[in-house]
Image (cartoon, grey):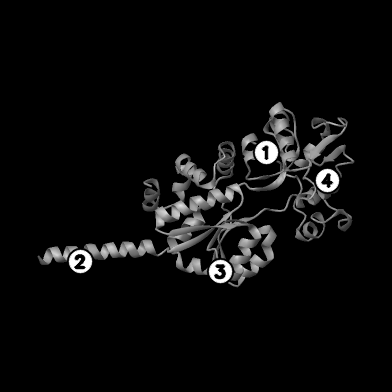
Amino acid sequence: MKSLAKKASLGLALLLGAGAAMAECGNVQIANMNWASAQLMAEVDKIILEQGYGCTVELVPGDTMPTFTSQNEKGEPDVAPELWINAVREPLKMALDEGRLHSANSGPISGLGEGWWVPPYVIENHPDLKTVLDVLERPDLFPDAEDPSKGAFVGCPAGWGCQLTNANLFRGFKMAEKGWKLVDPGSAAGLDGSMSKAVNRGENWFGYYWSPTALIGRHKMVKLDFGVPFIGSEHWDGCIVKPEQECADPQASSWTKSEVHTVVTDSFAKSAGADVMDYLKNRVYPGDVMNGMLVYMDENQAEGADAAAEFLRAHPDVWKAWLPEEAAMKVKAM
């Protein structure tokens, strides 16, 4: 009887200990941003934190500025999975320095960013075109529909911040003198349609876009190295991103680095436990996988939850590497 009682007591202790470990994570608020890649990430985090680590997760609506402001001033939500920091760089640095917020992951998606792109067959057919500088010497390969004597560079629609950036870089690279025309696509649909129409016809296309996006994934677009170094933040922020009248002498430059972080509040960093923080640190989506998932979401009109389930099904080699074996088995068994 003493032996049975001892075993029962030990079993109860182990059960209570396991329950305490599972409860360590507690309640978690995750920002569910209003774009596809962030929605996928939020839903994957929800599944893994709940199934693998015993958290109770609530997804709350989010966007870059409102989410950062709320985290910084109110300490909620606990996690912003995909925070593009260029718009909040200075206040975020202050919050990190003062310990209110923490960067749990400084690169949760690889290969992301803005830039100038061409279809893959342009590089296959013209392997000498390795950089933007190389492409700028061949406007004849990208004839403008209205004036075939000039090369067409497709920029951003009027009203977008990147319209100013592309226009100033167009001047900085002296593209007009080299035989190029800056094309305003008119709208987001016009920009997308311009690329898709050219690729579907096997025609050359050269223009601005960003990743991760479904369009880049669908067409396997190639982002070009600019062939020149980044000009520096002082000239970029003080001229390149400004209206033309405030940027009299723009210089050629690579695009400024796009940075995305997974940002957590101080209270979450202290209470979530080392295992959860390690998961967030290890969680990196390869760029080609993320673009492929965005294609899936677009073609199937899939919401974040459905896309998360598909990601876990289709890419166990990716997500299992983020987790210890025990947590991975729990997620797999869901």
Amino acid tagged 4? Phe
Q: Is mark 4 on a helix, strand or loop?
A: helix
Q: What element carries label 2?
A: helix
Amino acid tagged 2? Ser
Amino acid tagged 3? Gly
Give yes or no for contact between labels 4 and 2 (Cβ–Cβ under 8 Å): no
Residue located beneath label 4 in the image: 170
Q: Which of marks 1 and 4 is nearer the N terminus?
A: 4
Residue sitting at x 76%, y 41%: 132
Distance of label 2 from label 1 (alpha carbons): 62 Å
Give yes or no for contact between labels 1 and 3 (Cβ–Cβ under 8 Å): no
Give yes or no for contact between labels 1 and 4 (Cβ–Cβ under 8 Å): no
Of badges 4 and 2, the one in the foreground is: 2
In percent of width and height, residue 218 lies at: 62, 35
Q: Which of marks 1 and 3 is nearer the N terminus?
A: 3
Residue located beneath label 3 in the image: 75
Determine which of the numbered discs, if any, sits on residue 9 in the image.
Answer: 2
In percent of width and height, residue 138 lies at: 81, 34
Give yes or no for contact between labels 2 and 3 (Cβ–Cβ under 8 Å): no
Is residue 203 rendered to the left or right of residue 47?
A: right
Classify residue 178 by image quadrant. top right
Q: Which of marks 2 and 1 is nearer the N terminus?
A: 2
Position of the N terminus by quadrant: bottom left
Residue sitting at x 28%, y 62%: 15
